[in-house]
Amino acid sequence: MSQFFQIHAENPQARLVKQAVDIIRQGGVAVYPTDSSYALGCLIGNKSAIDRIRQLRRLDDKHNFTLLCRDLSQLGEYAKVDTSAFRLLKAHTPGPYTFILDATREVPRMLLHPKRRTIGLRVPGNPIAHALLTELGEPLMSVSLIMPGDEQPLSDPEEIRDRLEKLVDLIVDGGYGSLEASTVISLVGGEPEVVRVGCGDPEPFMVPA
C-alpha cells in the first residue's frame, strides 16, 4: 500500500516533502506532479525501481527515461551543453520542455539511448517537483504517467490512487495534472528539432524554412 500525501501546489509543506524524499531515497517508486503531466519517478541509479516502472508502463529497454533536474547547474552535470544550447535552456527553463542532449559520464548506461549517448533532461517549474528535487539533491529519473492502453496521462489524483496505490510506494497529490506530456526538443547536432509537441509551446524552436 502506497503513502498518499496531499501537498500544497504553490507552497509545498516542508515536512511532507522530506517524508516523500525519504521514501524515494529508500528505493521507492513515486507518482508526482510536474508542470506538464504527472510522472513516475525514482532514484537515478536504482535498477529495481527502474524495472518496476518499466513493468508498470510496459516499456521495453529502448524507451528513454528523462532526468528531472533542480536547475541548469545540476543539468550541466549530466549533459554536454554548448553556448547556443545554454542560451536556449536559460530562456526556456524551468518549463514544460524535455531537452535531448549528449550525456556526460555521470549518466548510468542503462538510462542512455542504446545507439547514441544522449539523454532527455528537464528543469520543471512545478513548485512540488522543484521542492522534491531540492530536498533530494540529485535528479529524479522519470517517465510520464501514461498507463498501458491509455492515450493520455492520468491527471486526477483520486483516480491515480485507485489504480496505482498497490503498485507504487508514494503518490503525491498536487491537484489535477495536465493531460499533455512535455514538449521534447532535441539539441543534438546543431539546430533545435521538435521531436514531440506537448504542453510547451514549440514555436520558439521552429527553424524557418
Image (spheres, rainbow, N blue to C red):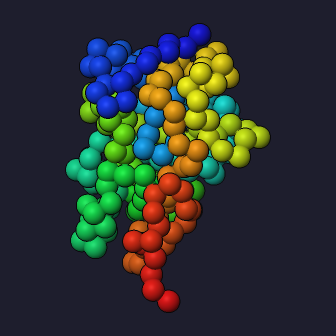
Using the image, determine if residue 193 lies above or below residue 158.
below
Q: Is residue 96 visible?
A: yes
User: Residue 80 falls in which quadrant of the image?
Assistant: bottom left
* Residue at (29% x, 14% y) in the render: 15
Using the image, determine if residue 119 lies above or below residue 56.
below
User: Residue 79 falls in which quadrant of the image?
Assistant: bottom left
The location of residue 198, given as percent across then percent down, is 54, 56
The location of residue 47, given as percent across then percent down, is 53, 32
- Residue 184 lies left or right of residue 55; in this view the side is left
- Residue 163 lies left or right of residue 83; in this view the side is right
Which of the pair 31/188 is nearer the observer? 31
Q: For the image shown, how many numbered marks are present on the structure? A: 0
Which of the pair 38/117 is nearer the observer? 38
* Residue at (47% x, 24% y) in the render: 173
Where the N terminus falls, by quadrant?
top right
Using the image, determine if residue 120 lies above or below residue 54.
below
The location of residue 43, given as percent across then percent down, is 43, 31
* Residue at (63% x, 51% y) in the render: 62
Q: Is residue 112 visible?
A: no
- Which residue of the protein is positioned furthest toward the bottom in this rendering? 209
The location of residue 27, given as percent across then percent down, is 46, 22
- Which residue of the protein is positioned furthest toward the top in this rendering? 1
* Residue at (31% x, 67% y) in the render: 88
Which of the pair 137/39 is nearer the observer? 39
Using the image, determine if residue 47 lies above or below residue 35.
above
